[in-house]
Image (cartoon, rainbow, N blue to C red):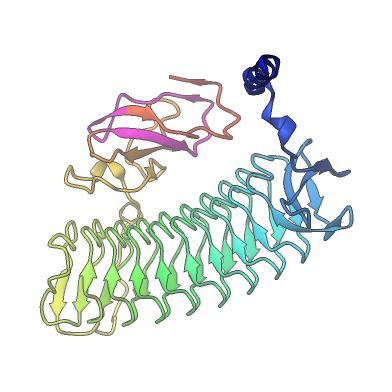
């Protein structure tokens, strides 16, 4: 009996030293002739595209691999694959995962089959060469920041099947000129079209009930927008820095407007409010930073002439932002519209800053310039720069030095 107990005690002492992998079965991962990796699903019934071993340029994903269907493009499958120029997906694929094509900066085209029902968060973030994309009518959701910084994207078709557009979905798509939102969508997420500086017009369907915070902020070319009477709330800063907007009508269905909704809309001369007086649900500072005349109890009058404005007035200069500006303002970058001289420190243009939660300092969160040497200033907009954020200079290969 004593010998038996000794054996049991020894086994208990040795067990923690044995790798747990000996007791689990890992998913099978295989590589095809293109260098693309496939991982078997947990139930062993289909394959997931999970990565690559060599950087491909053109990829065609097969409908089947090793006799099983290929159903998913996995999370981060082609992340930072800078050589990828085009990819074709089969009708067997039903989902595109988070970060699937993150920073595929050479990707110019992709064919999404009508079997796909969801586009994940950050799916095409930083795909700066992608010029157009057609979303099939099988897709019901576009994830957060899905096309963030797709700066060459000029057009996109959103089908009637889509019910939600995620936060920051088209953030900084600076070449996007127009977009039609289908009447299947009920809400426009926070920052959805932030800094789409080429967007001149947008149609909001009467299915929309809410416009998120900063949704159209810094759309400096947006000249007109019609808010349907289905909308009940307009978020904080929703149309801030829309410097080409001249007038707007707010229907009497709107019971809530956040602070700074029309901040720095320098050419906005008239706001027509169908309600007789300001509702209780409208923030006191809803028109802060806007000199427009408020017309209560009336609809918008016919526009008789196009107002004139200078090129300088049609861009947002971050240095003009007052200290009372919102502490939760989204990211923005210094750009060529700045009044600063060309003698500025090399590399400061293109740096992106985000104000911290308590509004006391800035965080460097990105860079979209072309300099090889970058100098980060000690202060920005009168506040100290204290942090370099996660992924701030991710995928920027030309950077040789930073101070």
Left or right of residue 104, residue 378 in this image = left
- Queried whether the magenta region covers residue 367, the answer comes back as yes
Answer whether residue 321 is visible to the viewer in this image.
yes
Image coords of residue 264 (percent x, y)? 24, 56
Seen in the picture, residue 397 relative to 26 is either above or below; the reply is above
Frontmost residue, 367 versus 90: 90
Q: Residue at x 65, y 56 (%)?
A: 96
Image coords of residue 339 (percent x, y)? 32, 40
Q: How many marks?
A: 0
Seen in the picture, residue 97 relative to 356 is either above or below; the reply is below
Q: Which portion, as a residue range, is magenta?
A: 361-385
Seen in the picture, residue 400 relative to 40 is either above or below; the reply is above
Frontmost residue, 252 versus 10: 10
Task: Tell me the quarter of the image containing the N terminus.
Answer: top right
Q: Residue at x 31, y 82 (%)?
A: 229
The residue furthest left is 277
Answer whether residue 269 is visible to the viewer in this image.
no
Left or right of residue 264, residue 222 in this image = right
Left or right of residue 249, residue 29 in this image = right
- Quarter where residue 135 is shown: bottom right
Q: Residue at x 63, y 61 (%)?
A: 132
- Quarter where residue 92 is shown: bottom right
Frontmost residue, 365 versus 390: 390
Q: Residue at x 30, y 54 (%)?
A: 313
- Queried whether the magenta region covers residue 190, the answer comes back as no
Task: Tell me the quarter of the image containing the C terminus.
Answer: top left
Image coords of residue 299 (percent x, y)? 22, 84
Left or right of residue 3, residue 400 in this image = left
């Amino acid at each position: 009996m004593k010998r038996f107990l000794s054996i049991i005690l020894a086994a208990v002492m040795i067990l923690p030293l044995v790798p747990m992998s000996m007791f689990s079965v890992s998913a099978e991962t295989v590589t095809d002739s293109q260098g693309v990796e496939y991982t078997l699903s947990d139930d062993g019934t289909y394959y997931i595209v999970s990565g690559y071993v060599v950087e491909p340029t053109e990829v065609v994903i097969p409908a089947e691999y090793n006799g099983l269907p290929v159903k998913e493009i996995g999370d981060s499958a082609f992340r930072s694959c800078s050589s990828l120029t085009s990819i074709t997906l089969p009708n067997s694929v039903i989902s595109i995962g988070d970060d699937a094509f993150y920073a595929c900066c050479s990707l110019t085209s992709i064919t999404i089959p009508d079997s796909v029902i969801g586009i994940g968060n950050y799916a095409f973030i930083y795909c700066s060469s992608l010029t157009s994309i057609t979303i099939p009518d099988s897709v019901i959701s576009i994830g957060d920041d899905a096309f963030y910084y797709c700066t060459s994207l000029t057009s996109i078709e959103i089908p009637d099947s889509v019910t939600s557009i995620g936060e920051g979905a088209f953030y900084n798509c600076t070449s996007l000129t127009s977009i039609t939102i289908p009447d299947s969508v009920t809400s426009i997420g926070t920052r959805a079209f932030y800094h789409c500086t080429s967007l001149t017009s947008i149609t909001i369907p009467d299915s929309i009930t809410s416009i998120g915070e900063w949704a159209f902020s810094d759309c400096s070319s947006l000249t007109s927008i019609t808010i349907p009477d289905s909308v009940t709330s307009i978020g904080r800063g929703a149309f801030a820095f829309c410097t080409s907007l001249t007038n707007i009508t707010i229907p009497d269905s709107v019971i809530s407007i956040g602070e700074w909704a029309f901040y720095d809309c320098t050419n906005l001369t008239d706001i027509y409010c169908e309600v007789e007086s300001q509702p209780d649900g409208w923030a006191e500072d809803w028109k802060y930073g806007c000199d427009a005349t408020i017309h209560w109890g009336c609809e918008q009058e016919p526009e008789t002439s196009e107002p004139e404005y200078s090129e300088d007035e049609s861009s947002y200069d971050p240095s003009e932002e007052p200290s009372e500006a919102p502490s939760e303002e989204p990211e923005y970058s210094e750009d060529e519209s700045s009044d600063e001289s060309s003698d500025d420190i090399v590399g400061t243009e293109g740096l992106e800053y985000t104000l911290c939660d308590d509004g006391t300092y800035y965080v460097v969160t990105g860079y979209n310039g072309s300099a090889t040497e970058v100098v980060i200033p000690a202060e920005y907009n009168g506040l100290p720069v204290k942090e370099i954020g996660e992924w701030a200079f991710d995928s920027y290969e030309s950077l040789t030095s930073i101070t």
